Structure formats: C-alpha cells, structure tokens
Amino acid sequence: MQQVFLDTNVVVSFLINRSKEQTVIIQEQFELAKAGKLQLILTTEVLAEVTYILFSLQQTHAQTAKNLLSILKTEYIFIPDREAIILALGVFAEKQIDLVDCILFAKAKLAAGKAFSFDSDFKKLL
C-alpha cells in the first residue's frame, strides 16, 4: 500500500476550508485511505507546524486543540504517537503552553518518565 505523508498546507486547508477545489482533492484522498487503497500519515512535526499556523490565524489554544483532535480521531490516518499527542492537546488547551512542550511532557508521562528542561512552561505542568 502506498504511504502518503500529509503536509502542513493540506492539513490547514482541510481544517479551515481554504478552497473548495483543495477540499475536494483532500476528501478524495481521505476516501482512498478509508477504502484501504493508501495510507495517510500525519507526523508530529506537521501537527506542530499546523498549530503555529492556526495561531497566526488568531485561533485560541482551545480552538486549535479542538481542530487538531478532529483529525487525530480519524482512524484511517496513521499518526505516530497518537496517544501522546491526544494527551498533549488536552494539556495544551488547559495550560496554554507550547504544543511541543506538551508533547514532550505527554511522551514522558506515558513512559512513566519525566521531561528535563529549563523551560519555565514545565513548571505549569507540575
């Protein structure tokens, strides 16, 4: 099965309905993935970049988390570390800190470990 890695502009276009033409193309790809004809992959790096773009469009932490969760719950999109990212988005919406910090925190928590950082945002996570 062909693996198709989603780029930031595709995810943003889908979330904000940037253009009718792009939405149709994205839906076609989603349908192919749903039918098992290709595997859509959404990486953590792309999710982080989408977050920054949504902020530039004046979305709040809560709005951004809600939008990203709608994609994370799509079963036919493969997302490495899905569980950690879902946990991270909850922290992100609640604590209003950088998503990458939240992902690091979530991965450490799920591994029964801890994050090592000098970033003051981690104090909000204790």
Image (cartoon, rainbow, N blue to C red):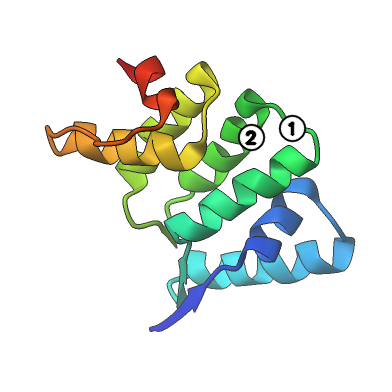
Looking at the image, which is closer to me, 122 or 84?
A: 122
Q: Earlier in the sequence, mark 2 or mark 1?
A: 1
Circle 2 crowding by C-alpha within 10 Å: few under 14, some 14–19, many from 20: many
Contact (CB < 8 A) between labels 2 and 1?
yes
Q: Which residue is the extreme one toward the front?
A: 118
Question: What type is the residue that disc 1 sits on?
Answer: Gln
Looking at the image, which is closer to me, 119 or 82?
A: 119
Residue at figure coordinates x 54%, y 47% from the top left: 71
**Quadrant in which residue 87 is drawn:** top left
Residue 29, which numbered label? none
Residue 64, which numbered label? 2
Residue at figure coordinates x 59%, y 31% from the top left: 66
Looking at the image, which is closer to me, 100 or 7?
A: 100
The residue indicated by pointer 1 is: 59
Question: What type is the residue that disc 2 sits on?
Answer: Thr
Residue 76 appears anywhere in the view: no
Residue 15 location (% of width, % of height): 71, 48
Residue 84 location (% of width, % of height): 32, 40
